[in-house]
Image (tube, coloured by chain):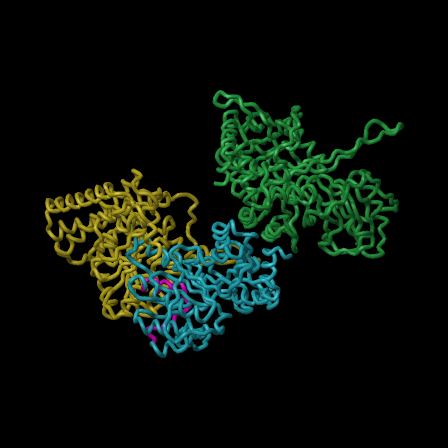
Amino acid sequence: MAQIIGLPKLSPTMEEGVLVKWIKGEGDAVEPGDLVAEVETDKANMDFNLEDEGVLLKLLVEEGDTVKLGAPVAILGEEGEDIASLLTEVDAMRAGGGQAAVPAAESAPPAAPSAAPPAPTAPPAPTAPAAVAAQPAAAPAPSSGRVLASPLAKTLAIELGIDLRTIQGTGPGGRIVERDVRAAAQGAPSAAPAVPAVAAPTPAAAVPAAAVPAVAAPTPAVAQVPAARETSLAVVPPAAPPRLAETDSDYRDEPLSGVRKTIAQRMLAAKRDIPHFYLTRSFDVAAMLAFRKRLNELLDGRGKVSVNDLIVKAVALALRRVPECNASFMDAVIRYHNRVHIGVAVASDRGLITPVVRDADLKGLSVIAAEVRDLAQRARDRRLKVHEIQGSTFTVSNLGMFGIESFQAIVNPPEGGILAVGTVVDQPVVVDGELTVARRMTVTLSCDHRVIDGALGARYLAELVELLEKPESLAL
Amino acid sequence: MPIISMREALNQAMNEEMERDPDVFLMGEEVGYYNGAYKVSQGLLQTFSERRVIDAPIAEMGFAGIGVGAAMVGLRPIIEFMTFNFSLVAIDQIVNNAAKIYQMSAGQFCVPIVFRGPGGPAVQVAAQHSQSLESFYANVPGLKVVMPATAYDSKGLLKTAIRDDNPVVFIESETLYGVTSEVPEEEYLIPMGKGDIKREGQHVTLVAWSKMVHTCLDAAGELATMDIEAEVVDPRSLRPLDNEIITDSVRKTGRCVIVEVGWPHCGFGAEIAFQVQRDCLDHLDAPVERVTSDDVPMPYALNLENEVQPQVKDVVAAVKRVLYLE
Amino acid sequence: MPSIYPLARTCNGYAQYIPRSIVRPRQLSYPSRPMSTPEQARIDPVDEEPEPVTKEELMPLYRQMLAIRRLEEASAKAYSQGKIGGFLHLVIGQEAVCVGAIATIGQDDYVVATYREHGHAYAKGIPARPILAELFGKKTGLVKGLGGSMHLFDKETNFLGGHGIVGGHVPIGAGAAFKAKYRGEKRVTLCFFGEGASTIGGFSEGVALTALWKLPMVLICENNLYSMGTPLYRSLAVEDVSMRALSHGMARDRFDGDDVIKVKRRIAVAVERARETNEPTLVEVRTYRFRGHSMSDPGLYRTKDEVAEWKRRDPIRHSRQRLVEDCGVGEEELKELENEVKAEIADAVRFAEDSPPADEYFPYVIKE
């Protein structure tokens, strides 16, 4: 019996997705677990696996189409089966905004065939290699907002440092069970591959996916390239200004990508809902630069530590010293995080992404450096797994490489703060009554005032500056 | 090491203990000249005479109570119920007297008595003769409840039970009387409250006692062909219960299936399930499963009787459920 | 004349006849006149010559009965003050039975009793102090506050308990007797129970096995005419409980229980029989409790007149009278004894009140 296949929920917050690429074509046989398509969600490119057996009789959407969750994408059945009635049903569903059963349900046999191929609603998105093996939920995802996981899965997740919200459960009702966590820990899809969590995280706990705090208007600055140019953040090459034909309009409408849409929604919400305030400090970076130079000499080509890596480490250690800043406003409670996960803003051609350095306070500088470099590269390649962009407790945004002296970032909810890092500037300073030149850097801490008060934020910045002015302490 | 049946093992245990302690006597219906309805007491009358192997008329409440009274004043009776179904007419003596006198007398009178006999379904003996009453007795403070599954366990545990200063409900299984195992010739005792791993495995813990140990071992064999290694834990006594051996196993496997031939509602497995969730919550990957008989009085017809009781396939299915393999 | 078998009701179209003996006047309301008078309940002739007695024999028995009565009166008072809780069953009025019977045995012999056993415990030699402390729920109680009124046990005096389940203790008594026979000891067991127990299985099985195995036990039915609130004729087809012995080929006896000396003499015969031949005896003693079944019993099932009439047969008054009339004991000596008893019980009450509360219960669940 043929059935209509609807678009499955592939991420906790997904409401729609772009069908990036069909892996299977019409007439192809599929078995349970087969990858049939790649879907771009608000989080990442996800695999769309089928859990049924049969032949793909009809593909109902084209590559690049944006599809609502549950909307029909294909018809699965047996070879040669008549699907005319199903096609009618698909039309009816589209007209009525109805949904196909997810992932599949037997359809009622309705009336006459009238199959019009659906019009694409969005230009094809550039295909990208599937970052994460995906599999539709075994059952419709519950919308309770809870992560359903067995106690053992929860225990294991803590042990292995896995964010349960990033895992698709394969147990009953989408329960995350031991094998799901183990598969996620191995990073590779196994018999039961790790896929995005089946249940939406609680709104307050939701970490913006690929979103990075937007940047406030940069202050004009001396375009001074920092002595140590960052390698972990890529500069987006300027695109050539488009030639305008006489008849073209003065603008171009670009459909929002999933990433862009998420950034827009979340940044708007953050700026609207979070009472921000900002604390700025500048400090001498001579010792830090010398320390970095010495580290890189020691590494002797086996890796490279950037100024940003030092800052990530310092931010993490400062959170250990002032743990009240490692906190989230959760409506009813303030959640103090026991672990320090630092989000690092990375520019990509789709927008800013914030991969997470987990337990950054516990990791050595070379480990952080390697991790950030790897995450940044994969962010640009869109090969980040969902769990690698979730779960940060504090974020560092560095625009120093663009010559930005200082700026104010938007807090990345549910974090309590974000540090905006500017470039290194030669500044005149008075030392012992003498005017001299010093190399200085300016950082601005944006705080969620519901969690962090002014004095607390100031204390945090003081600890941070102390760590960076005495960078040897980062190695302690 | 000699291989003997559970029937012989129980007989040896009584023989040795009666030999050892002149205060031990056996009383029950048909235990003497008939040699026991299930021949467990075979030959004891010849060895120990009518004075110590006493055929009782059909009066369970009476002779169970005589056992309790005799135990209070220093004897060590073994009261045999032809089947534990008949213990229900004596349950006043077991629950109201045997279990309580030590406490009611503030420790002045203890009641060293063993109530033993076959319990649980045999084959086609229908509703009144096919009951598993261990959950009844295990509910009572002051009683100990033992349910051995092998000849070796039976002998070591019965000897311990006879020497125990407390009332012990020792429930055998008619269907296991012929089951054989190696039993050493030299004397040994098995403490109550110490379970036994009947088979090791790392994927799932099967908890079972008495007859169901064998069902679980069969199921474990079948599961092994699917690369599932089940650990079969036999607590051997339900009160005291070796909670540690169960929780250690569940902490290792993360999954627990409790198999009992009794009824589901308020069955002893529910108590184990409670203890497992309390002590192993963070180790559980799936809800604790129970496999029990159906919630019905036992029907007579063989096919129905089998259907009511837990079978190997039911155990296998439950294991698959906790492993999310369905 | 009505027929012998009055028409009761029809069933399946056939008339059902019920023997007249069990068709009794229906009591639709509480009795307005006595249902059992001492004369109706009497077994022995009124003009029967009392057993000859000496002061030496009677004085200690009188003292025991009096102490039991004072002890129970003190208990009733403490109960009304909330110092004793739960069930409290008083033996007041029946003292001659337990005192007379237990006077025939020694410390090594066993006594098993019901939940109405304060008197039996005292008669067996347990002092008033631990009995009252137990009733008060104190640590110094006979069973450390774990048993209360219904569960007095004492290993030292071989008192095998007050038992709360009617009839369930009869096999236990048989068990104690079994042990005596098994070990060849010349110990006798006295097992007390009410006539209400004679209808329950534990009693029947206990009697059957005691008779079958010839266990050295004397089964003493304290027939106080009411099983709780139900009079004899509504609970027993044959009101003579000792008749149960006949079907088991067991010796039996039956007599009135207001003369402690008579109780002692008649029970002594049965005890002797048990001790020498292991033959058990089933004895019924007619008696009457003056108080309710328990403290919560208003006694509406019998009239005040009935109780008052029975009180004229009060065994304690009876004994006192005999001490004065037959033994020539002076009023002064009796007063002295009575004051001594009063002091003993008052001391026991103080002891119970001043004792620390019960404080442990886990050690006695399972013997390690």
- Residue segment shown in magenta: B49-70
Quadrant in the rendering for residue A200: top right
Quadrant in the rendering for residue C267: bottom left
Would you place residue B50 above or below residue A265 in this image? below
Give the yellow chain's letter: C
Prevailing secondary structure class for the magenta stretch in the rendered image: helix
Query: Could you tell me which quadrant the N terminus of chain C lies in?
Result: bottom left
Position in image of residue B279 (x %, y %):
47, 51
Would you place residue B243 above or below residue B184 in this image? above
Residue B62 sits inside the magenta stretch = yes
Query: Could you tell me which quadrant the C terminus of chain C lies in?
Result: bottom left
Give left or right: position of C152 versus B84.
left
Position in image of residue C138 (x %, y %):
28, 45
Give left or right: position of A1 versus C265.
right
- Colour chain A appears in: green
Of A452 and B229, nearer the camera is A452
- Colour chain B appears in: cyan
Position in image of residue C347 (x %, y %):
19, 43
Of A182 and C300, nearer the camera is A182
The residue at 39%/78% (across/down) is B43
